Amino acid sequence: MRMIEIRDTDITDLHVDAIVNAANESLLGGGGVDGAIHRAAGPGLLSACRRLPEVRPGIRCPTGEARMTEGFALPARLIIHTVGPVWEGGEEGEPALLTACYRNVLGMARDHSLKSLAFPAISCGVFGYPPEMAAVIALAEIAKSRWSGLKITLCCRGDHILRSYRDAAEKLALEVE
């Protein structure tokens, strides 16, 4: 049985099999969650990301895809990096790209037999995705996932994002903690 927990917490403090990094396409660090994860993981993360092959110049992980590295100095054993879409008003394929982020991360979790996973609110920070819309996509994709036995923590920083995810869970009739 899957357990979903929604809470306001620092993803870098969690003792889980993997945390999800809301990264940029270079995977070389940035602001927000990405910067916090790189700082907490230490310099080994940057070195590991640099070793990941570029699929195009400067791009190691295209939007919607996922890559995995060790967790380094984090309490999490692994980091699954995914790149969410920048919100452009919803007419540039953003919902499909955000759905792909969750689907690809959950597929990677299944393929590696993970038991616990923590997500940030992908694309809801500097990428500007409206949390009310992003939360429905995130929770709907998690609900569709066929990987049972996976404990998922949704790390929602701030009242607005936290409320958006809790409202989405209620709207989708999902049992969450």
Image: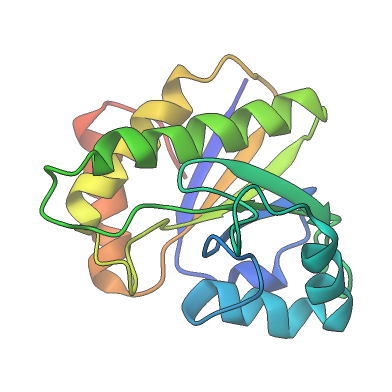
Q: Nearer the viewer, residue 173 or 12?
A: 12
The residue depicted at 59 percent of the width and 81 percent of the height is: 35
The residue depicted at 11 percent of the width and 42 percent of the height is: 91
Task: Give how far across and how far down residue 23 sits, in percent.
Answer: 55, 63
> Left of 98 or right of it: where is 119?
right
The residue depicted at 42 percent of the width and 52 percent of the height is: 84
Residue farthest top in this picture: 146
Task: Give how far across and how far down residue 167 sits, in percent.
Answer: 21, 46
The residue depicted at 28 percent of the width and 72 percent of the height is: 159
> Left of 157 or right of it: where is 168?
left
Q: How many marks?
A: 0
Q: Nearer the viewer, residue 123 or 59?
A: 59
Give residue 65's quadrant in the image: top right
Task: Give how far across and how far down residue 17 sits, in percent.
Answer: 80, 48
Vertical side of 43 occupied by 176: above or below: above
Which quadrant would the N terminus be assigned to in this image? top right
Give residue 139's quadrant in the image: top left
Vertical side of 160 occupied by 173: above or below: above
Task: Give how far across and how far down residue 10 sits, in percent.
Answer: 58, 74
Q: Nearer the viewer, residue 123 or 9?
A: 123
Vertical side of 118 occupied by 76: above or below: below
Q: Nearer the viewer, residue 64 or 111?
A: 64
Snapshot colouring: rainbow
> Left of 49 or right of it: where is 133?
left
